[in-house]
Image: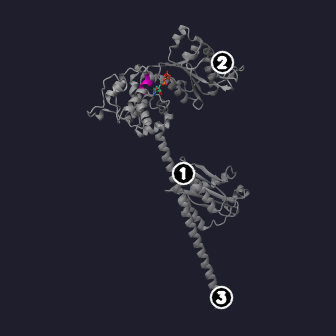
Amino acid sequence: MSDSKTRFLNSLGQARQKSMEAIGRKNLAWEKLLEISRQISSLDLDAVLKLILDHMIDMTGTCRGLLMLVEKNGSLAMKRAVNMEESPEFHISRGLAQQAVKERRLIVVEDVPTSQVANNHSVVNLGLKAILAVPLISREKVIGVMYVDSDELAHGLNEVDCAFVEAFAAQAAVAVENAQLHLKLKQDYLFLKEPLDEADRFDMIVYQSRGMQRIRHAIEKVLDNPITVLVQGESGTGKELVAHAIHYQGSRKNKRFVAQNTGALPDTLLESELFGHRKGSFSGATTDKIGLFEIANGGTVFLDELGEASPAMQVRLLRLLETGTFRRVGDTTDRATDVRIIAATHRDLKAEVAKGSFREDLFYRLSVFPIHLPPLRERREDIPLLVNHFIEEFNRKLHKSIHLIPKQVMDMLINREWKGNIRELKNFLYRMMVLSPDDRLNYDPTWFDPEQEPVATNTDETPDEKAFKTLQEVESDYIRYVLKAVSGNQSQAARILGMKRTTLLARMKKYAIKDV
Ligand SMILES: Nc1ncnc2c1ncn2[C@@H]1O[C@H](COP(=O)(O)OP(=O)(O)OP(=O)(O)O)[C@@H](O)[C@H]1O
């Protein structure tokens, strides 16, 4: 064989070898892509973003990068960065990333110093050699962008890699969008579930009576004002609930709310609870102790049953109210505290003052902002809503699904004498619900008074189900009612309903409440 023929065959063999290697590399690359796609199909957004950027850096042989997602307003928000946090060249990367998003195309700068971007001197000064930015496009929409760069000369950012990077970016975009959707669904679900949580509801004051409407307005006035509040009302009318609402819906909500029953402890112990004590100040005081007025600094102290406070305690409280300072038991230094005091009593304090058993000066200090809660018998129109509210609460607690309230049962609840007010109604309902065997609220007087003849309301006669409202209907009506009362002001309505505004919006959507 002639030399030239041998040379020709050799070079042909080498060319074939090269192209075989190239095909092999391509195959490997696509296999890798497949493997990566499998990995990034997780539904956890953070995990997906991390995997994507790590793979991108790995694949391109670069050493750092960032991933940004397009926000609702069109801006780019940085979601992940590797070795780029607080990097001075961040504005450069952002600029190129923005360009990739705007032009919806992969941007590769293989040799920065000789490229157009080198006009930007800082790029060269920073020693950047290779840059790549690729948009994440899913369903025709750019949802984000990845940027990587390297201070070594680009290697392998050739055609195969570009196609590969684009294919990877397309896979990544789908994975990101799926994870975003999943997150949104999860948030929506939590959103709908949220109002069912006890924490969201525990300061929800339920009412529709005029008397309670006035009280709600009064509460609104003191939410952002540290004024002392005196809540008066019979036992079980909701005094502590009002105190909770004032604290948790007001500007002090992020600080402590502490409650102390002033009538429940002997004076020395009560003093120590409220003001704290020095070690050794009385037998049993083995360490220094911080009192509630210090613990609740910036927050609220709820003094329940204040009418029961001893004369000595009244003097100490008056001093605190007048000067904003107090002393720990056995201490010689005054300490300052910033607490809002909400006092409550079932007694008629004015009458107690007249009798001489309550200090007049303290009474005037306390009653700067008095709230008088009417007994339940004076606001029977609140009962259906309260019944509905407690049934919902106990359905959750007891894992029941009572949703029918026979008319005669509701009438009985509305007309019954509630000496213990709302607390008694609540306990009564709890018992009814425990004993009701099906989805209907049953009432049998013998459950409460064994002397009574059984008068079962759960008779065989089929009730007319149309005569009942479902709990959802009652809730929807109530939301409309409140919105109307506040002329459609959603923030105010949400506060009244004791729910977040976002929760109210979700409920309005659920019940198709538009204009009120
Ligand atoms: N308007 C209301 N809406 C919803 N729940 C209420 C309402 N009023 C009272 N309750 C509930 O009734 C129960 C008794 O209320 P609360 O303890 O606030 O009454 P109180 O007047 O402080 O009682 P006491 O004088 O005996 O300390 C609580 O479980 C409270 O959540």
Q: Residues within 10 Å of mark 1 (few under 14, many from 20)?
A: some
| Residue at mark 2 | 323
Q: Amino acid at mark 3?
A: Ser
Q: Amino acid at mark 2?
A: Thr
Residue 487, position in %: x, y?
A: 44, 30
Q: Is residue 298 left or right of residue 514?
A: right
Tag of residue 44? 1
- The answer to whether the residue labelled 1 contacts the one labelled 2, judged by CB atoms less than 8 Å apart, is no
In the rendered image, which quarter is residue 156 located in? Answer: bottom right
For the residue labelled by badge 3, is the local secondary structure a helix, a strand or a loop?
A: helix
Residue 215, position in %: x, y?
A: 48, 22
Instruction: Give the residue displayed 58% in from the left and 62% down from the top.
Output: 165
When the figure is inspected, residue 367 is found, relative to residue 140, above or below; the finding is above
The span from disc 1 to disc 2 (Cα, nearest Å) is 55 Å
Instruction: Give the residue displayed 54% in from the left and 63% down from the top.
Output: 34
Q: Earlier in the sequence, mark 3 or mark 1?
A: 3
Instruction: Give the residue displayed 63% in from the left and 65% down from the top.
Output: 157
For the residue labelled by badge 1, is the local secondary structure a helix, a strand or a loop?
A: loop
Question: Magenta residues?
Answer: 421-426
Residue 424, position in %: x, y?
A: 43, 24
Tag of residue 4? 3
The span from disc 3 to disc 2 (Cα, nearest Å) is 110 Å
Q: Residues within 10 Å of mark 3 (few under 14, many from 20)?
A: few
> Is residue 367 visible in this depiction of the protein?
no
Q: What secondary structure is the magenta-colored segment mainly?
A: helix
Q: Magenta stretch: residue 479 in it? A: no
Q: Amino acid at mark 1?
A: Asp
Q: Residue furthest bottom?
A: 1
For the residue labelled by badge 2, is the local secondary structure a helix, a strand or a loop?
A: helix
The span from disc 3 to disc 1 (Cα, nearest Å) is 62 Å
Q: Earlier in the sequence, mark 3 or mark 2?
A: 3
